[in-house]
Image (cartoon, helix red, strand yellow):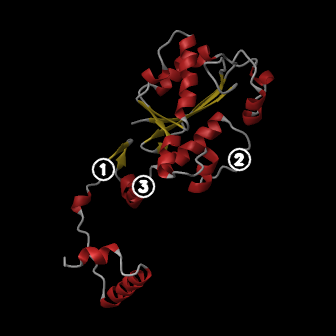
Amino acid sequence: MRQIVLDTETTGLSAEAGDRIIEIGCVELVARKLTGNNKHWYLNPERDSHEDALKVHGISNEFLRDKPKFMAIAEELLEYVAGAEIIIHNAAFDVSFLNKELELMGRPAFTRRVGKVTDTLAMAKEMYPGKRNSLDALCDRLGVDNSSRTLHGALLDAELLADVYINLTRGQDALLIDEADANTVAGITTRIDLRQFTLPVLLANDQELAAHEDVLKQLDKASGGKTVWRVAGMPAG
């Protein structure tokens, strides 16, 4: 499926309270590869940004005065995302703003036009429970260079999130990445059936078995002879 990594910047935190979108950045992936077919808009929100929001994105109210309103770019955006999987960090936030903008136009919700929405924040929380999972934290954890991110910007953040998403979802695919690339033609990836491979079984040698037994004995001693695998293996008496 064609994927679009999307990010927005807004005048504040609540679409329901009247905050609006001021910037949208989109990065396209096809077969998990960047295509360069990206989209980026600055928008006139018809209201000023909250002071706290200005500290986050640094986009002045004056800069946005002559930018198009959301209505002017809505059709281009909807055609661009139509049917795609949309990847967003903290998706509920961005989707609520997109839905509200379309509602103000009398148009159906954003989610009605796309294939599905994937939330990388939810993915990261599942993979790294109890850890910080902001975009910056994930960049640091996954080795994605975010040194140019001094302020939030929709297109830059979408580009960083695309790298983060690829790393989050690589998994076992990394073992077959070269063969997968070789079997990708015109954006279609051929799955490799692992059943065609005969995997050798390597048994432990005497030295390795002895070392393993020594570790088990140390665990037995530390637990007072109550290690579960020893007790479970003893005959009933």
Closer to the chain start, of discs 3 and 2, is: 2
For label 2, the residue is 148
**Nearest to the observer: residue 63 or residue 201:** 201
Can residue 57 be seen here? yes
Check the image and report above or below for 18 versus 138: above
Identify the residue at image location x=43%, y=21%: 112
Q: Residue 216, how many percent across, how many down?
A: 37, 82
Identify the residue at image location x=40%, y=53%: 181
Can residue 113 be seen here? no
For label 3, the residue is 171
Q: Residue 28, how many percent across, how many down?
A: 51, 36
For label 1, the residue is 191
Q: Relative to residue 115, is residue 75 drawn left or right?
A: right
Q: Which is in the foreground here, disc 3 or disc 2?
A: 3
Identify the residue at image location x=41%, y=84%: 221
Check the image and report above or below for 101 versus 204: above
Quarter of image, res 89: top right
**Nearest to the observer: residue 25 or residue 37:** 25
Q: Residue furthest left?
A: 236
